[in-house]
């Protein structure tokens, strides 16, 4: 499988940010891994146009479970595909916390994304309190059980493990903690989708930066990264892509 370096711009970026996209393409014209940026929806089409013919793919940060209808302010998976997206992030902890998204809703959105031809990047992860209580694997297992469609394959599903307490804090789990969770994810996925689970990309996310990327990518069952703040600047994201390409 080809590894995946995915950048989540969150609620950041304007047309002026296209300069960073061009700089990233110039810095990594042909990486050995797949390279993806998930900007705000307002930039999907523009970045897809700017990235045309390059190795850079474009994704979205969420979608509605319905293909169309009276859902003011929402975007459907077919709309995102039409704008040039190939992937969509679903179930991010910020969506689960800020918008109350449940596992069932994440699963419905993942099904919609896959039906529209998008790759669903389903996020899972524990809070600091859950980690301290020894509940990490139970929490993540329940999220996988509830959020991943049984029709998922290695071609239409990516799982991103993001410990909530490590997102944007500068803190990261130990290498052994990351390895434990990723091995658990691989086994849990096999319960749902069988042999396909061996080829599903498992990304780590949570304060990934150039200084720690190489050691994280060297771990078994870590097939890439979902990067937040460090993906906003080509000077920060390109070294992460390079580290993954070399892993």
Image (cartoon, rainbow, N blue to C red):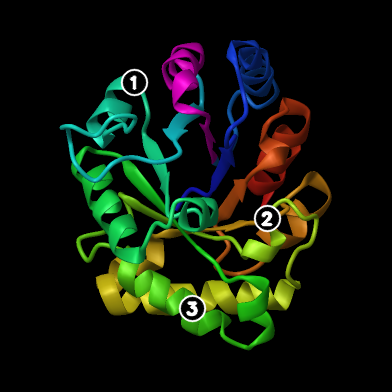
User: What residue is rendered at 40% in x and 60% in y?
Assistant: 200
Q: How many marks?
A: 3
Q: CA distance from mark 3 to mark 1?
A: 34 Å
Residue at (46%, 29%) from the top-left corner? 58
Dot placed on the residue nearer the N-terminal end, 2 or 3: 3
Mark 2 surroundings within 10 Å by alpha-carbon count, few (fewer than 14), some (14 through 19), many (20 or more) = some
The stretch of residues the image draws in magenta is 34-53
**Does 69 sit left or right of 246 as displayed?**
left
Q: Residues within 10 Å of mark 1 (few under 14, many from 20)?
A: many
Secondary structure under the numbered disc 3 in the rendered image: helix
Q: Is residue 128 above or below residue 240?
A: below
Residue beneath disc 1: 83
Mark 3 nearby-residue class (10 Å; few <14, some 14–19, many ≥20): some
The residue that appears at 60% across and 17% down in the rendered structure is: 14
Describe the element under mark 2 as helix, strand or loop: loop
Query: x and y percent of residue 97 in the render?
Result: 51, 58
Q: Give the answer, above or below, for where 70 lies relative to 140.
A: above
Choose mark 2 or mark 1, whichever is in front.
Answer: 2
Residue linked to disc 2? 167
Q: In this orientation, which residue lies closer to the viewer: 131 or 69?
A: 69
* Closer mark to the observer between disc 3 and disc 1: 3
Residue sitting at x 27%, y 36%: 77
Between the residue at mark 2 and the residue at mark 3, the CA separation in whole angstroms equals: 17 Å
Element type at mark 1: helix
Q: Position of residue 155 (x, y in %)?
A: 31, 50
What residue did someone put label 3 on? 139
Provide residue 1's location: percent of width, then percent of height.
44, 53
> Whole-percent x and y of residue 25?
62, 21
Whether residue 58 appears in magenta in the rendering, the answer is no
> From this viewpoint, which residue is outermost toward the bottom?
134
Q: Is residue 178 above or below residue 121?
A: below
Q: Is residue 115 left or right of residue 187?
A: left
């Amino acid at each position: 499988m080809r590894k995946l370096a995915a950048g989540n711009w969150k609620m950041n970026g304007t047309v002026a940010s296209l300069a960073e996209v061009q700089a990233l393409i110039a810095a990594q014209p042909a990486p050995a891994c797949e390279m993806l940026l998930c900007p705000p929806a307002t930039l999907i089409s523009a970045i897809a146009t700017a990235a045309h013919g390059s190795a850079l793919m474009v994704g979205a940060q969420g979608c509605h479970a319905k293909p169309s209808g009276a859902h003011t302010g929402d975007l459907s998976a077919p709309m995102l595909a039409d704008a040039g997206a190939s992937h969509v992030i679903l179930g991010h902890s910020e969506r689960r916390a800020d918008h109350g998204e449940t596992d069932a809703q994440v699963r419905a959105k993942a099904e919609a994304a896959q039906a529209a031809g998008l790759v669903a990047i389903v996020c899972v992860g524990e809070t600091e309190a859950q980690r301290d209580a020894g509940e990490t694997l139970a929490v993540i297992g329940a999220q996988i059980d509830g959020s991943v469609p049984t029709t998922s394959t290695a071609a239409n599903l990516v799982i991103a493990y993001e410990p909530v307490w490590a997102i944007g804090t500068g803190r990261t789990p130990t290498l052994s903690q990351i390895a434990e969770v990723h091995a658990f994810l691989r086994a849990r996925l096999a319960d749902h989708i069988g042999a396909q689970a061996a080829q599903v990309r498992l990304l780590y996310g949570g304060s990934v930066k150039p200084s720690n990327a190489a050691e994280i990518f060297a771990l078994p069952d870590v097939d890439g990264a979902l990067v937040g703040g460090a993906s906003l600047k080509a000077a920060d994201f390109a070294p992460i892509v390079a580290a993954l390409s070399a892993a």
